[in-house]
Amino acid sequence: MVEGFDLEPHHVAILTAAAEAFDRKEEARRLVATEGLVVQNGSGVPTPHPAVQIEDAAALRMARLISELGLDAVPDERGR
């Protein structure tokens, strides 16, 4: 997947961590989609699904890692 790119080993590690965060985010999103945003806790009281926090945290981690790689940068007028 990284062939054709000039990546240093630390870039590959960051990219790998971003991909793992994406996987975690998607897994949590699927769980919430299946079970709903609200679940009952052990006492039967409706509470936000714990996977919502997992999804949010993973999305934030992924965004930070992508930003660290500079993949979120807007190209300048010359297309760079």
Image (cartoon, rainbow, N blue to C red):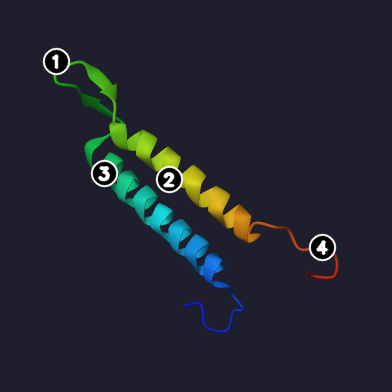
Alpha carbons under labels 3 and 2: distance apart: 14 Å
Crowding at dot 2, Cα within 10 Å, few <14 / some 14-19 / many 20+, comes out as many
Q: Which mark is residue 43?
A: 1
* Residue beneath the point at 53% across and 71% down: 9
Q: Secondary structure at mark 1?
A: loop
Callout 3: helix, strand or loop? helix
Other residues around mark 3 within 10 Å, as few (<14) / some (14–19) / many (≥20):
some
Q: Position of residue 10 (x, y in %)?
A: 54, 66
**Left or right, 60 with reference to 68:** left
Give the labeled residue for mark 4.
76
- Residue type at tag 3: Leu
Where is mark 3, residue-wise?
A: 31
Q: Residues within 10 Å of mark 4 (few under 14, many from 20)?
A: few
Q: Are marks 3 and 2 in contact (CB under 8 Å)?
A: no
Task: Give the Cα separation between the discs numbered 3 and 4.
Answer: 39 Å
Gap in angstroms between the C-alphas marked 1 and 3 = 21 Å
At x 43%, y 45%, the residue is 58
Question: Above or below — where is 25 with respect to 39?
Answer: below
Q: Which numbered disc flags the more N-terminal residue, 3 or 4?
A: 3
The structure residue drawn at horizontal position 32% and vertical position 45%, both measured from the top left corner, is 28
Label 2 and label 1: CA atoms lie apart by: 28 Å
Disc nearer the start of the sequence (2/4): 2
| Secondary element at tag 4 | loop
* Residue holding disc 2: 58
